[in-house]
Image (spheres, rainbow, N blue to C red):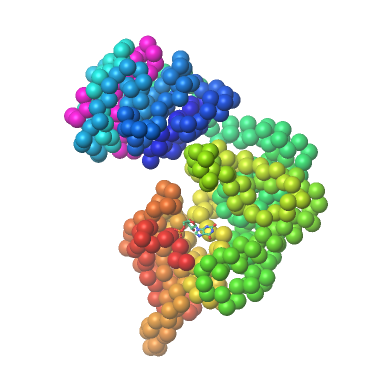
Amino acid sequence: TIVILDFGSQYSQLIARRVRDLQVYCELVPYHARAEVLENLNPCGYILSGGPASVYADGAPHLPEYVLTTDKPILGICYGMQLLAYHFGGKVFPGAKREYGPSTLTVLKKDNPLFSSLPATELAVWMSHGDKVTQLPPGFEVLAQSENAEHAAIGSAERKQYGLQFHPEVTHTPQGKDILRSFLYEICGCSGGWTAQNFIDESIERIRQQIGDGQVICGLSGGVDSSVAAALLHRAIGDQLTCIFVNNGLLRKDEAQQVVQTFQTEMHARLVAVDAVDAFLEALAGVTDPEVKRTTIGEKFIRIFEAEARKLGQVDFLAQGTLYPDVIESANRHEDDPAAKIKTHHNVGGLPKDMALQLIEPLRFLFKDEVRKVGKALGLPDQIVWRHPFPGPGLAVRVIGAITPERLDTLREVDAILIEELWASGWYQQTSQAFAVLLPVQSVGVMGDGRTYANVAAIRAVTTEDYMTADWAHLPYDLLSRVSNRIVNEVPGVNRVVYDITSKPPATIEWE
Ligand code: XMP
């Protein structure tokens, strides 16, 4: 295992994903993590992330004792490099000027293990820092320099400690992956082997041990995370798993059938499919306020889920598709931060206390791209593995204004055309989320010889890493044109299509 200490860089998770891509398992822990946290990890090396602080500033985060005294290799990136210099007897100069952007690195020590795999001694790198190391710690030498940083890479081969002023983890440092690979394999001696298949094999063992002969329930939404969690559990414990799938009538076209088909018919998983369409639509009748829609749907879902869970009799575990970014986010908070309490049941809240369910989260150490690889290796169809995120309240927050079965059907047809064209053109996987919205607006049109007065549909497609900020996707005009033509020709009641070109912020991804 590689342990990455997080000093608050915006790139910390990216470092972890790069290391995992290189087939080395790593965990990202906060810089204030106690030594006990690391005991089970048995690190073969440390990476220190960048961060916004300045090493001499009051309250600046410093290296924990277990890193200061380790004989394992250390790679410090940006602030991490400054920490190495600061703690091991060098000097850091609080720079008045920030260096930000592309730069050219000149490697001075070509035979150093960190750089020996590179084909040339000059390479493009990405810088983002204010302070710089001005005096090396004893035993360190300069390995590379850039236009603005005389100490762009430093290291001590003997101590196996290295510092990089630039960011090897970002794509703007094209050979960064090679440098990280050298650190992991040449310097730390990692053995690799972190693959989807190995993860599946090890998880199956772990799940069987944890569950014993217990019974597990899992709420299946049709999304990637819950589907992969369920498929993995099913592979491990078969009929000890019962999936509960609630059709709330707010799903996309054919989605309910597809989930049932995949899990019940193909995988032969025990699946309770609840048809609650009428119950949800009745509860939503006349509701137009987005937040009231959300709470109405949330409460109804919990009540139905509870009722179904009770019918199963004795259940011991509740499975959830929690992913690593949520785990990191909870861990990164200091213990005295009131938000530090991990929100355990945030996907399925309010299960009755007397059920005393233990939580099982088989994906809690995976990033989204790893979940997709695992899903693929488990044989789930592409339509599920690559599915964009879909909000719990579903189409209810995409039919703007009042929700009726007719308007839901209209939106389903519009959305299905968009999604079909995105898949056909290869754009589905290049967008993070794409969907249609049915507006409570009528517009005038002309069709054949007749005037129409019908609905307006909006198309939304965004690209984003984390869904906190997003850019509208720059879809090709001919694709948009095809989508629009098909919608107005094939979907009765829609005579106009508009494309949403707003980023988040200031807009949100959803319209409600
Ligand atoms: P916004 O619209 O806030 O959406 O930019 C960010 C991401 O969250 C999803 N989303 C929801 N997911 N329940 C959910 O489970 C909700 O009420 C909800 N609202 C938004 C949205 O689809 C996007 O991926």
> Outermost residue toward the bottom?
450
Residue positioned 19% across, 30% down in the render: 148
Residue 301 placed where, x, y %? 65, 62
Q: Is residue 277 left or right of residue 329?
A: right
**Residue 482 inside the magenta-drawn segment:** no
Q: Is residue 20 left or right of residue 100?
A: right
Q: Residue 135, how many percent across, how many down?
A: 25, 19
Q: Position of residue 429 (x, y in %)?
A: 44, 51
Q: What residue appears at the point 62 percent right and 42 percent down from the top-left corner?
A: 361
- In the image as oriented, which residue stretches furthest toward the left? 147
Q: Nearer the viewer, residue 462 or 93?
A: 93
Q: Is residue 128 above or below residue 109?
A: below
Report whether 400 appears left or right of 117: right
Name above or below for residue 457 compared with residue 80. Answer: below
In the image, what residue occupies the spot 34% across and 63% down? 501
Helix, strand or loop for the magenta stretch, by majority: loop
Q: Position of residue 380 (x, y in %)?
A: 59, 47
Check the image and report above or below for 485 versus 451.
Answer: above
Q: Which residues are magenta?
A: 147-176
